[in-house]
Amino acid sequence: MANLLDQTDDSELMPLDVQTVHAWSQRYLQLMGDMPKEEEEPTDAQMAALDKRVNQMGPQNFLQWQASKKVFRVAAISLDICSLASLMTYEKVIERLTVQWPKNWNLIAHADDKARAEMLERLRRNLVIYLKDGKRVPADFKEDKPWSVWEQKGYMGAAYQIASSTVGLVKAMSELKGNFWAVPSRSSREIKRNEVLKLASMVAGHGRDPLPLSQETVEGVAACLKGSGMRSGDQYLNELKLLHIEEGYDMPPWLVRTFTLCKKALCRNKGPTKKAAEAKLENISDDLWQEKGSEFKGGINFAVMYAWACVWMLREIKAGACKWEHVRADEQQKQITLSIPMSKMDQMATGVKRTLQCCGEVVCSRFCAWNLWSRMQKELPSKFKKKGFVFINEKMERLSKSKMIEAWNSATSCRVSGHSARRSGAVEHVRRGMQIQELAFLGR
């Protein structure tokens, strides 16, 4: 075999009978209609070697493979080569592949052979290099017993397990698509898509599917958006284009040109960009500011709630996600550290920490993180546990977006939006002398 097909295969090749070789030649002749050219025709020995590798290598079916693996399992456990869990996991992967593709055992057996002969050794070699370079490896990895880590999360073995399970693959694909966009972006896009698709259906006419898009439908939707005075009309039009593409329809040049012209028309004469409303903490009434948290359903003063989001420059969705466990207070330094496990600006989800110190004034200002944290802790009624979400309703549930915005409106007597606290906080930090570089770092 080493001289004919695989240099690593030292097994012997038994000579074949003339009838078998003749049958192979006849199969080729029937399929191709003629015999191969002399320089392209393999020798009888080469044909026999390939036949052995593809059709006669190892066990002939899963039951034979499983029987041989039971012997291997006993030997591996006795010699302490790898863990029982790793062996069982690997066997389950092969079993799932066999169930999913019952007619392809030859390919599965060949893949199994390559995995054990090549993939596992490559995994061991890479982990040894990572270990010497000080990179992350599984906590229980040992150079003399490397095979137990192949199926752990973070390595290719885990990916093989997912791929071999139909249910696991569907779940993994669903989770992947769920991470195409950040949570706030995803919800906004879904709303826009549903609304613009409804508008396109109305423009196309009742009973007609607007997809694939026509020039008349695109121009009609753009005209309706422009006529309505919506400043975000171009965003809705872009979602309509993406819907068309993601449904598998082509984008011919005329349709690309139609979208380009319509987008220009929607963006023309829009005026200045509309920013989130700014609401200063100093404009909140003294009476409301001095009210105790016990007077409010969630145990925290609405004004303090809004001030907390401002001082940390948090959007509504991040303010609502704050938990008591995310906050650390240094009593000696009078410092507050807020941990944000996942941020829109933190694509790698490594986590972000923001630290602010007491303002240092004789009487702490409304814009002092230390003062706000002290008040929230002291004023929280005993019936509320300092665990889980900080801002909750009377049912001890996380405050919804609408309810939080409603609380902010009540505190500021303004019509604020989900971005108002972030913008108002940034402006206030600058007024108090914070440098732009520091502001960017704090708001990351």
Image: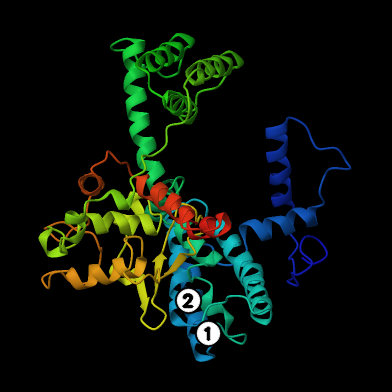
The residue at 32%/59% (across/down) is 308
Q: Which residue is mark 1?
A: 76
Return the disc, 1 or 2, that comes first in the chain's sequence: 1
Question: Residue most toward the front?
Answer: 362
The residue at 44%/49% (across/down) is 427
Question: Where residue 198 sits in the image (x, y, percent)?
Answer: 31, 22
Q: Left or right: 332 with respect to 442?
A: left
Question: Where residue 6 sits in the image (x, y, percent)?
Answer: 76, 63
Q: Residues within 10 Å of mark 1 (few under 14, many from 20)?
A: some
Label 1 residue SS: helix
Q: Left or right: 269 with respect to 297?
A: right
Q: Residues within 10 Å of mark 2 (few under 14, many from 20)?
A: some
Q: Which residue is mark 2?
A: 87
Label 2 residue SS: helix
Along the viewing direction, whichever of 274 and 411 lies nearer the viewer: 411
The residue at 56%/54% (across/down) is 436
Along the viewing direction, whichever of 435 and 113 lies nearer the viewer: 435
- Say which quadrant the N terminus sits in: bottom right
**Pointer 1 with pointer 2, Cβ within 8 A:** yes
Question: Where residue 86 sits in the image (x, y, percent)?
Answer: 47, 76
